[in-house]
Image (tube, coloured by chain):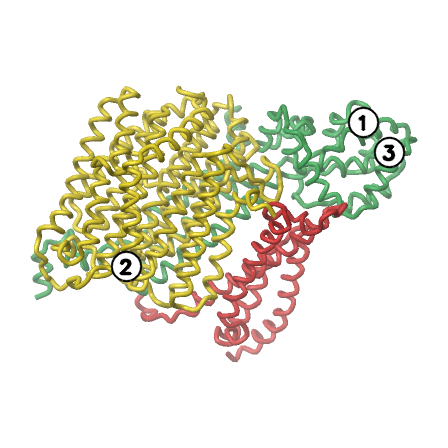
């Protein structure tokens, strides 16, 4: 039943294709102008669903920044990270270039208070800063981040949720693309094996946050605005057409135009029209 | 319009809807929300008003001329922010230029608030304009002829 | 601030900020002057940008200082600097021209809206050209398209069919744009990036089904927007019933920008390593270009309406551009770019001449053109000279286009295409000659559907029109100007696409 699973696993694409075809069918098959607009809307909505579904990461939450809550949780977390100090320090250095990583880093540091004062200082300055800082570090990191050399791993990212777990371990190598998607596991690679113990230790204290890819949401917000504008213009035209012609049925509109231009409908012979007039 | 229940409930709802719009507006810089959603919610308050009291009453509160001006001001707030950053020597819409030498990018914060305010104003005004023009059109053909 | 550093964003920022302000201006002359001022400023910015690019090579501008490929990048190389120059240049001529024509053809209450929409339309077209971000292309495309729907519908004051034409264009245009977005989505899904330069990098070696589907969606979507031959059905009505000044502007710019997007995606985003690019050239662009050249030209011959005739001619001319592309050689691409530029000059001049006739006679039927050489000689000769240019008579830009196309066709070994280009030009001679004959020789028959023009069109229309007619001849004589730039742009594009296939 491989093929069955193959089809079922891609249900989001089936929904997209189905809606798209319904929308296009309505646009082409219906003569009523308002129904055409409805069809156009269904068609556009199918594309929205497609975009949103490719940005979904299995187990990921909505791309809403949760720095505050996490920091709070980290503060109250148990001191279970004893002995992971070296790892924490290494991680602190290794991850500075990684935007979202930094925030998680501070939590790891916090959950694993090490012997090194340097590490402590970094983490305290992080935690004392407002949520604002964390968000803005993203920009700094992105501006300074080097171009990814091996970006392949993330490029398959938006496909299906299952692949994400594998690809995320390489997220650190693609900082500009990583956006807000990261896990402690991803971090460990970034900072080397030493950080692994820190991440494991931190795991008990801080629940890993996996965000879905926010970019498709942003794109679709833009596309929705465009869709609203298109619908408004289309409906406004339909209103004007009804005022000018007295109908919004396409065949009646064509007939009205033909009569205005040729004096009769193209199907009806001119003689009949003349008789009718007489 | 003598529907007492409708009138009272819509009066009750009007202020909370606008308050919610403002919440979404100002919460939108670092959370879910933002100018587009807030603008639509803001417009909904007035659309509800128009449903219950008639379009003429709403037009007295918010005339079309005011909406046109609001649309323009909203848009200019957005692009004006970009223009200011350009005048300050940075790229278009590089908010960092608004507060130079900030250690934690305060400029990004201010920039996005101003821009979202512009978006919210423009969207609310546009939505209401669309509503006014669709509902305000006198049908010149009998409803029977549809 | 350094004006040079901000130059790439100025052609977008200036008109888009000026557009809403037109709504606040009083009716009458003010919105028109305001819009003209900003099109000229934009044109000046585009000229400066063009000189900068020609001197120093491609320019990249990061919006909001977010480094690409994360942020939106404006990327200007010679190819799109040429198109920018074209769009803003045509706008700076058509806007002053529009005043009298719009006074007649558009409801007086709508004039501030009209000029605002025209500015937004220009911004959208410039934006599509300038941006280096694939999704941004869609956004600007819809900005220009939405204002175009409104502009076309404003022709309803004279003919209510403008409304149905605008509605059909809206349905077709939206389907095209949505197809384009699906294509972008598929590419994004397989690469994780939207920046065109980055897309080109990430797409290397990804010749899979998803990328193929994305390419197909982009091709069909853009094909709808640029009125590629079998998908051109929205165009004749839209151009016929739109206000004449709008037609002049759209015919010269809108479809050209869509052709540019096709070029950009074929050569800069995809490359010749993809088998399907070669297949699209050979099995889609070449036959459809040829078919468009003939079918549309042939239909044009039988039109009673001069505007509609020129609209069909536009579809045919798009066939030439696609034909040049489909050779996939530097010569072919040069011919396409040259023809994009030259066709804009001649079509704008032709539609402007029609606008003058509409202003004085109130009709764009061929009967209104009868005996016009005696009543409106200046307009008549503008029409005839640009018409000769459309046919491809030597010393006009049309000849340069045909020359480059013929060269490219023979160089690519498509000798039959060369003969077909000449044959199709003969059909152009038929439909332009028909109007010219009516204008020069026929006596006007007053059937009450139009008024006999009593005087020449006003100077505010004649001067812009003759500027374009002069450009038709100037660029027809000074062939090095457009030809060199187009060759350099084509070579750069070919380099990106990986040389000759």
- The chain holding disc 1 is A
| Label 3 residue SS | helix
Whichever of labels 1 and 3 marks the residue nearer the N terminus, that label is: 3
Q: Relative to the observer, which residue lies in front, C427 or C298?
A: C427
Residue A8: percent from left, percent from top: 53, 32
- Crowding at mark 1 (Cα within 10 Å: few <14, some 14-19, many 20+): many
State the residue position of label 3.
A119
Query: Chain A's colour?
Result: green
Please determine whether, in this image, residue A103 is positioned above or below residue A226.
Answer: above
Give how far apart the Cα atoms at labels 2 and 3 are.
77 Å
Report the side of C293 relative to A58 (left or right). Answer: left
Query: Chain C's colour?
Result: yellow
Q: Relative to the observer, which residue lies in front, B134 or C276?
A: C276
| Label 2 residue SS | helix
Residue C10: percent from left, percent from top: 51, 48
State the residue position of label 2.
C459
Query: Chain B's colour?
Result: red
- Which tag is nearer the camera, tag 1 or tag 3? 3
State the residue position of label 1.
A195
Residue C194: percent from left, percent from top: 54, 36
Give how far apart the Cα atoms at labels 2 and 1 are.
78 Å
Dot 2 and dot 1 within a common chain = no
Q: Can residue A72 be seen in this view?
A: yes
């Amino acid at each position: 039943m491989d093929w069955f699973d193959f089809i079922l696993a891609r249900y989001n694409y089936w929904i997209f294709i189905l809606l798209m075809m319904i929308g296009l069918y309505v646009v082409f098959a219906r003569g009523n102008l308002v129904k055409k607009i409805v069809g156009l809307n269904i068609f556009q909505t199918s594309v929205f669903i497609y975009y949103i579904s490719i940005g979904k990461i299995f187990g990921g939450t909505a791309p809403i920044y949760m720095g505050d809550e996490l920091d709070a949780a980290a503060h109250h977390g148990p001191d279970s990270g004893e002995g992971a100090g070296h790892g924490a320090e290494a991680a602190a250095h290794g991850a500075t270039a990684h935007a979202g990583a930094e925030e998680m880093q501070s939590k790891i540091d916090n959950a694993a208070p090490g012997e090194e004062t340097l590490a402590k200082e970094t983490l305290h300055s992080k935690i004392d800063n407002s949520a604002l800082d964390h968000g803005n570090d993203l920009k700094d990191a992105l501006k300074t981040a080097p171009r990814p050399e091996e970006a392949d791993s993330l490029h398959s990212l938006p496909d299906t949720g299952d692949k994400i777990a594998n690809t995320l371990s390489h997220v650190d190598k693609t900082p500009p693309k990583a956006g807000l998607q990261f896990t402690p596991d991803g971090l460990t690679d970034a900072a080397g094996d030493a950080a692994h113990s820190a991440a494991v230790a931190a795991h008990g204290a801080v629940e890993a946050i996996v965000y879905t890819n926010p970019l498709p949401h942003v794109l679709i917000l833009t596309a929705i605005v465009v869709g609203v504008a298109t619908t408004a213009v289309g409906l406004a035209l339909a209103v004007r057409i009804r005022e000018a012609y007295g109908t919004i049925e396409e065949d009646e509109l064509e007939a009205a135009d033909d009569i205005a231009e040729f004096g009769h409908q193209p199907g009806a012979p001119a003689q009949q029209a003349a008789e009718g007039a007489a | 319009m003598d529907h007492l229940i409708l009138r009272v409930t819509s009066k009750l709802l009007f202020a909370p809807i606008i308050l919610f719009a403002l919440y979404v507006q100002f919460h939108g810089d670092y959370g879910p929300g933002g100018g587009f959603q807030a603008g639509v919610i803001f417009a909904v308050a007035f659309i509800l008003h128009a449903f219950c009291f008639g379009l003429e009453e709403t037009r007295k509160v918010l005339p079309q001329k005011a909406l046109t001006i609001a649309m323009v001001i909203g848009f200019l707030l957005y692009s004006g922010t970009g223009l200011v950053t350009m005048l300050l020597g940075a790229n278009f819409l590089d908010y960092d230029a608004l507060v130079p030498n900030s250690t934690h990018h305060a400029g990004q914060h201010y920039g996005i608030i101003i821009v979202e305010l512009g978006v919210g104003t423009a969207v609310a005004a546009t939505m209401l304009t669309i509503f006014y023009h669709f509902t305000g059109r006198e049908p010149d053909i009998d409803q029977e002829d549809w | 601030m350094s004006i040079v550093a901000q130059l790439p964003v100025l052609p977008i920022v200036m008109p888009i900020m000026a557009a809403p302000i037109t709504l606040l201006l009083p009716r009458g002359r003010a919105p028109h002057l305001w819009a003209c001022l900003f099109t000229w400023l934009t044109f000046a910015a585009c000229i400066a940008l063009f000189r900068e690019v020609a001197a120093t090579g491609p320019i990249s501008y990061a919006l909001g200082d977010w480094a690409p490929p994360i942020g939106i990048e404006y990327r200007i190389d010679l190819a799109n600097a040429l198109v920018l120059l074209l769009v803003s240049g045509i706008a700076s001529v058509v806007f002053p021209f529009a005043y009298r024509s719009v006074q007649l053809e558009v409801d007086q209450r709508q004039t501030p809206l009209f000029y605002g929409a025209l500015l937004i339309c220009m911004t959208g077209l410039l934006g599509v050209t300038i941006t280096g971000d694939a999704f941004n292309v869609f956004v600007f495309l819809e900005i220009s398209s939405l204002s175009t729907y409104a502009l076309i519908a404003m022709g309803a004051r004279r003919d209510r069919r403008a409304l149905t034409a605008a509605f059909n264009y809206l349905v077709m245009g939206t389907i095209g744009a949505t197809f384009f977005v699906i294509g972008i989505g598929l590419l994004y899904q397989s690469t994780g990036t939207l920046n065109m330069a980055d897309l080109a990098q990430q797409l290397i070696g990804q010749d899979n089904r998803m990328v193929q589907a994305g390419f197909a969606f982009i091709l069909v979507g853009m094909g709808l927007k640029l009125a590629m031959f079998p998908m051109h059905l929205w165009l004749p009505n839209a151009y016929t019933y739109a206000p004449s000044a709008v037609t002049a502007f759209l015919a010269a710019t809108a479809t050209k920008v869509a052709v540019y997007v096709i070029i950009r995606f074929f050569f800069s985003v995809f490359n010749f390593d993809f088998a399907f690019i070669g297949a699209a050239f050979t099995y889609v662009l070449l036959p459809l270009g040829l078919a468009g050249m003939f079918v549309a030209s042939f239909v044009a011959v039988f039109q009673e309406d001069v505007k509609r005739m020129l609209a069909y001619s536009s579809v045919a001319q798009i066939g030439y551009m696609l034909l040049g592309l489909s050779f996939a050689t530097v010569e072919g691409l040069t011919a396409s770019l040259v023809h994009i530029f030259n066709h804009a000059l001649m079509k704008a001049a032709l539609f402007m001449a029609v606008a003058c006739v509409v202003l004085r006679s109130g009709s764009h039927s061929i009967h209104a053109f009868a005996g016009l050489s005696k009543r409106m000689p200046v307009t008549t000769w503008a029409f005839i000279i640009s018409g000769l240019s459309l046919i491809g008579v030597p010393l006009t830009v049309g000849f340069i286009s045909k020359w480059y196309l013929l060269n490219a066709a023979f160089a690519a070994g498509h000798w039959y295409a060369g003969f077909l280009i000449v044959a199709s030009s003969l059909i152009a001679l038929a439909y332009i000659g028909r109007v010219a004959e009516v204008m020069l020789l026929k006596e006007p028959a007053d059937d009450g559907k139009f008024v006999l023009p009593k005087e020449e069109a006003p100077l505010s229309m004649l001067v812009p029109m003759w500027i374009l007619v002069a450009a038709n001849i100037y660029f027809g004589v000074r062939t090095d100007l457009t030809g060199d730039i187009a060759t350099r742009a084509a070579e750069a594009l070919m380099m990106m696409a990986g040389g000759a296939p």
